[in-house]
Image (cartoon, rainbow, N blue to C red):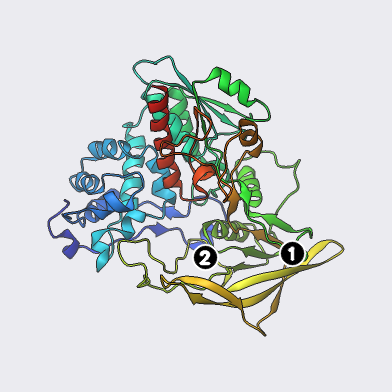
Amino acid sequence: MGKQGGFLEYDRTDPVYREPEERVRDFREVERMLDEETLHVQAARCMECGTPFCHGYGCPVENIIPEMNELVYRKKWREGIRLILSTNPFPEFTGRICPALCETSCVLAINDDAVTIRQIELALIEKGFREGYIFPEPPAERNGLSVAVVGSGPAGLAAALFLNRAGYTVTVFEKAHRAGGILRYGIPDFKLEKNIVERRVDLMKAEGIVFETGIEAGTDISFHYLESRYDAICLACGAEAPRDIDVPGRNLDGIHFAMEYLIQQNRRVAGEDVSGIRQILATGKKTVVIGGGDTGADCLGTAIRQRAARIHQLEILPEPPAARSEFTPWPKWPYQLRESSSHKEGGTRLWSVKTTGFSGKKGKLTGLQAVRVEWSAGENGLPARMKEKPGTEFDLEADLVILAMGFSGHGNGRLVESMGIEVSPNGFIKTDEEGMTNVKGVFSAGDMASGPSLVVRAIEAGKRAAEGIIKYVG
């Protein structure tokens, strides 16, 4: 695949980013695409692996990566686009926001820099849209059966797309005013501009999928309504129950959940009217983000753009090693330090810090109390047990605290309860191998069933649920 021995001749070229001092002034995407000639060279680095772990091990949607790279190297762009779309319905999303599990399992990554697979994928789909290779492809005929998809995030969109192309009449119900779920409202524009989401939704509409927005299933329409009108139902409402923190002062004014903060800013950037809701802005405030994951980084980047006076990001886990840990050898997803584009823009990261309380005056937040913790390793060598370090208590001034500690349960609890759907002890929907719940004909996909995970895994789950529905309905 690619140029024989190309990996010996060419070095990896990483994506280019806009300069921090420029990009923090707006919410436009921070990453720039590599040009076609550069990607032609990068594709030449792909090896003739006997077993391509990038495809069979790393990629949840099982993209046929070596062949994709070969087509880009030979500049057969149209063929490459059809190949990537045969496995991944939304390369424009994964090409921008996927952490590239494929690259960490690239065979070349054993002792060299991996192939720039994510950038190649993104270049393919964007060239496809530019050149008109991407166009509506409605099914040749309908089978007379209908499916309701509740939720229009990556899992719901994937389920809808595959069911529609199989000939089913698909209606997507979305409680927000615009479709896209977390892609539109949860992920900041500086990572994924919303015209990209709108472009895909418009294409799906042109293929015959109906989007009913501003309608919350379980509230505006009942389970009986859905059950009586559709042959199957797919629930893809995400993981919407945020993990909270139970410490003194939690009820002070100025403490908010991450998604509440991010959704509001995304609506603001989109020009939606947010005047009727309480404004959450970091402008001029001493801001603390609790949680060191991707959502926390998104909050950090948003607060920087809102001109926060100062920002700390706290993580209870220890700082990972700079390079891949020996306890997560190739081809596993490596335990190592990662910096998002937001971390390179500003803010202070503090590791091994546990929040113990909040303080305030007249009901308003003024500060945060914390303590350093130390971790001991478990059997796998990774952090497992924590204890507080005596004498390491400290305070931080804070006017705004954003809680970005993950999620503890599924979305749309009212609908789930009315359906009598079983929920696992961890707060998410129980499904079988086909994605079906204990209620016949009702399926669930994505974070709602698996718990919070990656967009690419949600896409794969939506595809799998669609296959289960097809098998069940016939």
Amino acid type assigned to the residue bearing label 1 in the image: Asp
Q: Is residue 112 visible?
A: no
Compared to residue 457, the image places residue 305 above or below, namely below
x and y percentages locating residue 449 in the rendered image: 51, 43
x, y (%) of residue 318?
A: 52, 73
Residue visible at 49% across and 21% down in the picture: 231
Label of residue 281 in the image? none
Q: Residue furthest left?
A: 4
Q: Residue at x 63, y 52 (%)?
A: 242
Residue at which label 1 appears: 399
Element type where label 2 sits in the image: loop
Indicate which disc, 1 or 2, sits on the residue closer to the N terminus: 2
Give the image location of residue 165, x and y in percent: 37, 25
In the picture, measured across the screen, residue 333 lies left or right of residue 192, that is left
Q: Disc 2 designates what residue?
A: 343
How many numbered marks does the figure carry?
A: 2
What is the three-letter code of the residue carrying label 2?
Answer: His
Could you say which is closer to the camera, residue 278 or residue 474? 474
Whole-percent x, y for residue 443 in the image: 49, 33
Measured Cα–Cα span from mark 1 to mark 2? 21 Å
